[in-house]
Amino acid sequence: MVSFEYLKASAKRSADSLQQLGDAVRTADDFWDAIPIFMRHIPSQHPESVDLSKPPDSSLIFAVTSLSSIARCLTRENLVTERIQRSICRNWPRIWSCLSFLNDAYTKSPALHEKVAEFQTWLTCVTSYLIYGVTSYAGIVGPVLKTPGVIQFIVDLFYRTAQTSMFDTATTKICLATLEHLLRISDWTSTYYPTFLETFEKVDVNLAPGLIQGLVLCAESKKMPITELSLGLRVYTMAINFSTPLRRTCVAQYSVYWMIAIFRKLINYRYTQDEFSEVIVCLGDCIIYLDSTFHARGHTVVADALGNRLLLLMLRLVPLFFTVLPDDPLYAGDKSRGAHGVYFQLLEDIGVESVSLSVLRALSKSWREIEKRGYYKQFLQGSPKQVQSRWLQFKEVVEERLALKDRWEEEDRLNPCSQCGSMHEGTKKMYRCSQCQISYFCSKRCQKSNWEEHREVCQELYNFRMMYRTPCLDKYEQDFRMFLIAESLRKHEKDMISDEKAYRTSNPSLSPHEPVIHVHHFYSVPMQREVLSIEEATKFIPEEPWLQDPDVLTGTHGMFLASFRKPFRSVEYIVTKRDLDGHVECRCAVEQYDDRTDTVTEEEAELMNNLSAQALINWDSEKPQ
């Protein structure tokens, strides 16, 4: 057996001995003695360029071997003392200089020699472990992350490994672990998170096809081990969670469809007892992705997910998912609100988006199938009371809004046939074009006859939807939303008197002549109500003229706010006033918009509205005389 002292001496001359020295480090004292030897082979000066058509020279081999040895020592238990952490911090500028040079020189261009390709793979692996090692210790991570370019480097490294080896259980897993433990740093949000987000926003959207291909493999591969599927899901969700452009591109490439396919595959998976825990974690990852996508994308993607039988899958999941005991780490672990909590959140999100006609139509179809096949009783029977209670709550909200939708469609006569102009009042139901979702026709014959006039606008609107930007609500969605508000005011009119009385009692300093505002929160299931003073309401919508105009306030019989979810967890308010004669007027409140939303830009909104208007009036200018 070769002695440690011999390896220290021979490491100056042989890369193999240098590698063996790193393997031989067993104690903190060994690591302390080996650091100067490792650093001796990490150059402070670098050539201007390297020739990718020739094998790397020996100095670069020594440098990467030294970096590899440091990385392996940092990832071993009980080797890194405070003294060693201080030493790594002192040497970090030199380590970083060498590491960034090597990666810039060798990983950003294709290899032109077999040895160079091998060196690139080795360098990526070493880099991944080294970054993981230096970010694992409180005494090192601060100086490392404060180094200009390091956060960008870590994000780029993760995407590079995800793109080339999404299911590599070594390199990709260690890069993923690095990002996951960085997000748990105590002062991460206040110190590094803005830079982290800014870096993710600059990620090249051309990475999306590779990520989608990974999802497709997860969904369609019949022999993929559950460990690889789990890694692929974690890599994908990390890759898109913080990047708005990348998430938007992935959704446009049917990521929700493939995620639901994986969801279905996991529910049908014949797992062993050892695999059960991993399957539950994978299901939780699917739910977390769908939940975050619903929040970011709104009703558009919710309707599509329901069209892929998401609601039925959530029912089928109950017997499997809720066999986990409440004290199990999966129930309330470190994943956001816990796996069960995210399940309930996803169910609530679907209910919240049921204020949209497109979502209600998809829910109506899903609910008919569930009731026809008896799935509601079949899958909820014997489940925990909390699960049954949440589903009952969801069922009541959905059934109430489906009834309102049916009533609104019966009452609404603003949908003339785009070909003949007829409304067929009381005789025939109108059908909406499934592609543009704007124009209405009374029959297939009318739709075909109108196609020449309708084609261009229809395709433009369809392309806009396929960009998966969250579109402005069309006229019918807006009308239905106002109908919901009016019905809510009517339903809770008697409750408003007692609500206002209770609020004034609990706020005695409020003048009896000062008006109050009743708020109906449609972004919760079931809908929540509260009473606010004018001062409190202006904190949410400070620019709203109606709340600033004394004439408006004194001339109303009631002032109301209806709040609806907007993408990225923000809220959209509709302010409603009822005058002394009982007339109701609604308008969208003026508010500050979140720059990070996936909603349309002003130019896109104008285009969307113009196209919608054109689709609606074509019948008037072109209808037969």
Image (cartoon, rainbow, N blue to C red):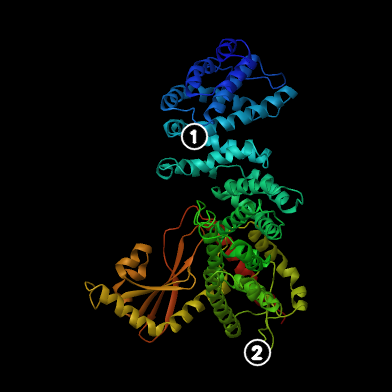
Image x and y of residue 522, in percent: 47, 71
Identify the residue under disc 1: 135
Which residue appears farthest toward the front when viewing the image?
A: 1
- Quadrant in which the N terminus appears: top right
The residue type indicated by label 1 comes to Thr
Determine the image quadrant of residue 458.
Answer: bottom right
Instruction: Name the side, left or right, on which 562 lies relative to 164.
Output: left
* Label 1 close to label 2 by CB (< 8 Å): no
Q: Mark number for residue 426?
A: 2
- Quadrant in which the C terminus appears: bottom right
Image x and y of residue 56, in percent: 67, 18
Looking at the image, is 465 positioned above or below residue 363?
Answer: above
Looking at the image, is 60 positioned above or below residue 191?
Answer: above
Residue 342 is at least partly visible in this image = yes
Q: Which of marks 1 and 2 is nearer the N terminus?
A: 1
Question: As rendered, which of 47 and 60 lies closer to the eye?
Answer: 60
Question: As rendered, which of 120 and 131 lies closer to the eye?
Answer: 131
Q: Residue at x 67, y 62 (%)?
A: 462
Camera-near label (1 vs 2) is 1
Residue 541 is at least partly visible in this image = no
Determine the image quadrant of residue 66.
Answer: top right
Image x and y of residue 208, in percent: 65, 47
Q: The residue tagged with tag 1: helix, strand or loop?
A: loop
Tell me the distance, in whole angstroms, between the alpha carbons under discs 1 and 2: 69 Å
Determine the image quadrant of residue 176.
Answer: top right
The residue type indicated by label 2 comes to Gly
Q: How crowded is mark 1: few (under 14 residues within 10 Å), some or many (20 or more)?
A: many
Q: The residue tagged with tag 2: helix, strand or loop?
A: loop
Question: As rendered, which of 430 and 502 lies closer to the eye?
Answer: 502
Which residue appears farthest toward the bottom when viewing the image?
A: 426
Image x and y of residue 593, in percent: 45, 58
